[in-house]
Amino acid sequence: MSVWHGNLHKKKASGGRKRSYRMKRKFEIGSFPTETTRGTAKTKYTRARGGIVKARLLNVALANVSNPATGKTERVEIIRVTGNPANVDYDRRGVITKGTIIETPLGTARVTSRPGQEGVANAILISKEG
């Protein structure tokens, strides 16, 4: 079963239910979430509405980590996923989404990009270990 982004499932402004007046359309089709995990880098390219090509990161090994104190950005290895506030299950499985806390050689960082939709893992340093 596919993901559907139509609005017939919503109620009318009056509170009544909407009656289906047509079938689902191709342009209303969505996609299942890309659950990016730590591992050897693997990217999948998918076509989106308007001919846009999305780079979806399936696995990621490196992240661009910015240090706000110095203003420098380094490409470093992701050691492990320490937490994901978006979803308890993602936290348990180590899925990387926007807001995920990761551990790097530079310290703990928070992911600021959407790896499953943008194809890149950017993070900002939140603390220095050592």
Image (cartoon, grey):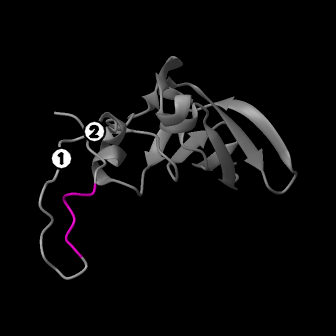
Q: Residues within 10 Å of mark 1 (few under 14, many from 20)?
A: few
Q: How many marks?
A: 2
Check contact, mark 2 vs mark 1: CB within 8 A. Answer: yes
Identify the amino acid type marked 1. Answer: Arg
Examine the residues drawn in magenta and state their main secondary structure: loop
**Cα gap from disc 2 to disc 1, whole angstroms:** 9 Å
Point out the residue furthest to the bottom here. Answer: 14
Q: Is residue 60 visible?
A: yes
Residue on which disc 2 sits:
25
Where residue 108 is drawn, which disc sits there? none
Image point (13%, 76%), residue name:
16
Q: Is residue 129 visible?
A: no
Stretch of the chain drawn in magenta: 7-12
Residue 119, compared with residue 94, is above or below; it is: above
Secondary structure under the numbered disc 2 in the rendered image = loop
* Residue 32 vs residue 89, the one in the foreground: 32
Q: Residues within 10 Å of mark 2 (few under 14, many from 20)?
A: few
Q: Position of residue 41 (x, y in %)?
A: 54, 19
Image point (46%, 24%), residue name:
46
In the drawing, does residue 62 fall left or right of residue 65?
A: left
Residue on which disc 1 sits:
22
Secondary structure under the numbered disc 1 in the rendered image = loop
Magenta-colored stretch includes residue 9: yes
Q: Position of residue 98 (x, y in %)?
A: 52, 49
The mark closer to the camera, 2 or 1, is 1
Residue 93, compared with residue 7, is above or below; it is: above
Q: Position of residue 51 (x, y in %)?
A: 54, 28
Magenta-colored stretch includes residue 31: no
Q: Position of residue 84 (x, y in %)?
A: 42, 51
Identify the amino acid type marked 2. Answer: Arg
* Quadrant of the drawing holding the N terminus: top left
* Residue 97 vs residue 106, the one in the foreground: 97
